[in-house]
Image: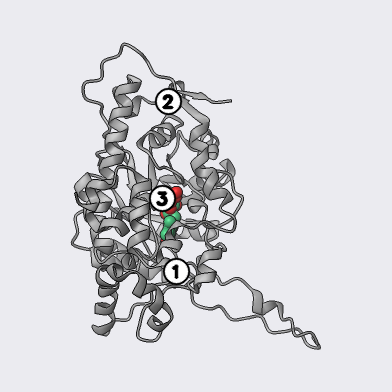
Amino acid sequence: MTVVDRIVNVADARRFARRNVIRSIFDYVDGGAEDDVTKAANERAFRRFSFRPRAGVSVPHPELETTVLGLPVSMPIILAPCGLVQLMHRDGVLGVTRAAHQAGTISALSTFAGAAPEDLASEPGPRWFQLYATDRDMALDLMARASASNFDALVVTMDSPTAGKRDQDIRNGSAAGLTFNARTIVKFAPQVLARPRWLLSGLKSSIETITSGETRRVPGGSGAPNIPKRSSPKGRTSQWNPADHDPVRISPFTWDDVAWIRQQWSGPFVVKSILSADDARSCVEAGADAVIVSNHGGRQLESTPSSLSVLPEVVAAVGSQVEVLMDGGVRRGGDALKAIALGARAVLIGRPYLYGLMAAGEEGVLRILRIMYEDMARTMVLMGCQKVTDLDPSWLRMEV
Ligand SMILES: Cc1cc2nc3c(=O)[nH]c(=O)nc-3n(C[C@H](O)[C@H](O)[C@H](O)COP(=O)(O)O)c2cc1C
């Protein structure tokens, strides 16, 4: 039996992933901000709902197909934009994109994935590009490259003016970004020696990149360029200079920036990481075609509400004007169906497919998508629901 055959659920993929990659990378993927309160809340939120099945209904072929921003998809699950994908397995972003394409769904490339938009230019889609930028020049450059590389939609992420505090990344020395080259590899040597398989499957591509003279920086949680520090006020005697403790800026978008980006990008436009009806209305005002209810998988601001608990509020506010998507904590196909019953057009998954990638490369990502698809199909048969697009809140019951 291959590793892929032994992955029956997301937790299995996580276990194999942990065995394959070095600790700094596994922790980077697995961790949430601070005490993991929001990360845990995301998963727990799905358990507050149970299904209200309809007995005596025959569902010979459940229909999972839908559209997202006009793109037909085989199921309402999309691969979320994630940083550092290129270091998780040698299949990297190409493997992720190809798995999504094979499964008939969308993958989103993060600005911080460790690959350039051009690397995917000739890959079949559908593909979205997720934008981070410290300023408008950087945004313009990336948008032009994404457009020239045939990305179908642009996603702007709103929750990352700076990086959340991920304690494990700080302990591992990777909070300021993971860069592997002749100098930094010494620091990671003990971890690499403990995971030789990753050395073969993951690091090789980085070494190739480096030896080809193209040392692309792969920013991690906070890989943004340093902004100038404030100078100390005259006469300060204390050693404590507040400017030394300023958070590093990653992508400090304002609503003016979002409206401006909308004007520069002619295709479908998605705003990610919205956690209130008011912000969802601001997205609509700025010209968004879709909003993603998300707290970044609990990796940014600790103690935000679970994404699922915010979803109904956002659907009520803007659901008649734009498509509403959500992510955070989806671990089973049934979780996705609950979000759809609450009004999401589709859900995104982050860690589940990253675990699959780290466990078994492109095949591992495909395995996770297949498991999610089969989970949803089986659940719909058991519920007596023919079409995913028929789901509404009447299919759910709130557990007390
Ligand atoms: C390792 C990792 C890196 C991420 N990097 C990004 C990123 O670069 N841009 C972004 O918009 N979201 C990023 N996210 C958040 C995901 O897009 C998504 O919102 C989140 O993973 C969903 O939660 P889940 O992991 O519980 O499925 C990242 C998530 C993870 C796990």
Q: Of residues 170 and 4, which is closer to you in this image?
A: 4
What element does badge 2 sit on? loop
Q: Nearer the viewer, mark 3 or mark 2?
A: 2
Mark carried by residue 392: 2
Counting from the top left corner in percent of width and height, residue 191 is at 40, 73
The residue at 45%/20% (across/down) is: 394
The residue at 42%/59% (across/down) is: 29
Q: CA distance from mark 3 to mark 2?
A: 23 Å
> Amino acid under label 3?
Val
Residue 291 vertical position relative to residue 335 in the rendered view, above or below? below
Q: Is mark 1 within 8 Å of ligand 1?
A: no
State which tag comes first along the sequence, 1 or 2.
1
State which tag comes first along the sequence, 3 or 2.
3
| Labels 1 and 2 touching (C-beta < 8 A) | no
Residue 368 vertical position relative to residue 240 in the rendered view, above or below? above
Which residue corresponds to mark 3? 270
State which tag comes first along the sequence, 3 or 1.
1
Residue 178, visible in the rendered structure: yes
Q: Quadrant of the C terminus?
A: top right
Residue 335 vertical position relative to residue 213 in the rendered view, above or below? above
Mark carried by residue 220: 1
> Amino acid under label 2?
Asp
Q: CA distance from mark 3 to mark 1?
A: 23 Å
Counting from the top left corner in percent of width and height, residue 340 is at 40, 33
Q: CA distance from mark 1 to mark 2?
A: 38 Å
Question: Which of the 4 image quadrants contains residue 343?
Answer: top left
State left or right for residue 312 relative to residue 336: right
The residue at 24%/52% (across/down) is: 3
Counting from the top left corner in percent of width and height, residue 352 is at 37, 49
Q: Quadrant of ligand 1?
A: bottom left
> Amino acid under label 1?
Gly
